[in-house]
Image (tube, rainbow, N blue to C red):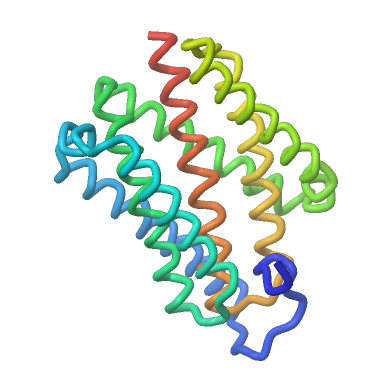
Amino acid sequence: MENSVFKRTATTGTTISHAFYNLVIGCVLCWGFLVNWLMVKNIEPQAIADINPWVFFIGYFVSCFFGIFLFIKSNNAFISFIGYNFVVVPFGLIVNMAVHSYEPALVVEAIRITGIVTFVMMVLGSLFPAFFKKIAGALTIALFIVIIVECVELFFLKKHHGITDWIVVIIFCGYIGYDWGRANQIPKTMDNAVDSAAALYMDIIILFLRILRILGRRN
């Protein structure tokens, strides 16, 4: 997309300081995690399970793609934030279903591990942005292959191989480093901060869900 956030090299908007830029990214991420936590606390998983599967998945993908379209194409931080929430809510429904399948202690452990891994990958993304940029194509190809493999497993083989969870964890560790490195190479505006947070949010949530599944299988 021509106006894709990470391809922006100039801006007509007001730039902000590096520290405030990172603070906005952190606050937007925390908002998404807070919304997800509130959904887990207040929505019964059975209420989600009772939704017709086709209605759920169509609604999920429509909401996510609409949200992604908004925050990628918009130069307005408020519009991008609205788009971000269109992604956060459907992701929250998936998180709700996932965490209620495991013991609370296991969920806390998955959160702790995800937090540590995310921090490490952000540091690496800051130190070696060129490296993560080089592997971006390989990450995309690997993710595409994993999606195909998991679809075949789900719809035809009716089973799941645990190795794919580890592969997805590695892929999204790479994406966190990549997206964080890109976030700090574009103009530091409020809108770009929101857009960067939205990309990182999706990376982190997917990483968390896979780590949770790995820990659940281990236990």
Look at 26% across and 37% down and name the residue there: 52
Look at 30% across and 48% down and name the residue there: 36
Q: Using the rendered view, name the quadrant where residue 51 is placed.
A: top left
Q: Using the rendered view, name the quadrant where residue 43 is placed.
A: top left
Image location of residue 136, percent across then percent down: 77, 45
Image location of residue 152, percent across then percent down: 58, 20
- Tell me: 152 left or right of 33: right
Image location of residue 60, percent across then percent down: 39, 48
Look at 51% across and 82% down and name the residue there: 76
Q: Nearer the viewer, residue 188 or 157?
A: 157
Location of the C terminus (image quadrant): top left
Location of the N terminus (image quadrant): bottom right
Q: Nearer the viewer, residue 192 or 27?
A: 192
Q: Nearer the viewer, residue 185 or 99?
A: 99
Residue 3, relative to residue 38: is it above or below? below
Q: Using the rendered view, name the quadrant where residue 16 is placed.
A: bottom right
Image location of residue 121, percent across then percent down: 64, 42
Residue 76, relative to residue 92: is it above or below? below
Q: Nearer the viewer, residue 153 or 207?
A: 153
Give the total of numbered labels: 0
Look at 67% across and 46% down and name the residue there: 177
